[in-house]
Amino acid sequence: MSLLRTLLLLPMLACLSACFISDDLLIEDGITLSERPVVICTPDSPPCFPAIPEGEDYIVTPTGEPPVRMRFKPIAGEFGAPVFLGAYEMKADEGAGWQYILVRASGTNDDGAATFDLALPGCGDARDGDFAAYGLVRSDQYSCTVTDIVLFEAYLLARHGADFADPAWWTSRD
């Protein structure tokens, strides 16, 4: 299976547990995680994939496939390692959109590239009062729409801030 298909399949599978999405990119000003390419890792197979900085975005370009964009912003707080909120571009025949992810600095690989663990937060963790309080809208049984990135960051800190410092949370997300 190509890297692009794996990358596209991962968000679709994650959405089965209710993912966070938006039609438009809500992270206006992206930051670079490193001046060099980085490696983003999941507990899945293949476990890691390279991401190349391009302006304020990162590009994943599998051989013979169209590029996929990612953009990141830091999350305020002390978690033992830097944590970033990211947006992952999803393209399909019926249109495009963005899925929201989290990454945490986890070290370097054998080539010296910075590595980051990836987690896909699920809106299944949201409580009834969270939707109005944090600008979340239940889109369907598998996804929730993010309407405000600042409120979404506050939601993530309220629901998962304590988890961010736990390495097991990053490697055991399903």
Image: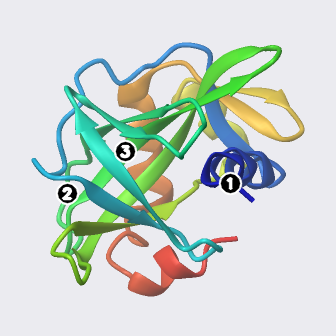
Query: Which residue position holds label 3?
Result: 85
Amino acid marked by disc 3? Leu
Query: Which residue position holds label 2?
Result: 77
Q: Position of residue 18 (x, y in %)?
A: 76, 47
Residue 164 visible in the shown view: yes
Q: Nearer the viewer, residue 122 or 131?
A: 122
Residue under the point 20% across and 49% down: 76
Q: Earlier in the sequence, mark 3 or mark 2?
A: 2
Query: Which residue position holds label 1?
Result: 2
Q: Secondary structure at mark 3?
A: strand
Residue under the point 30% across and 50% down: 84
Q: Position of residue 132 (x, y in %)?
A: 61, 25
Res. 145 mark? none
> Callout 2 environment at 10 Å: few (<14), some (14 to 19), or many (20+)?
few
Q: Secondary structure at mark 2?
A: loop
Amino acid marked by disc 1? Ser
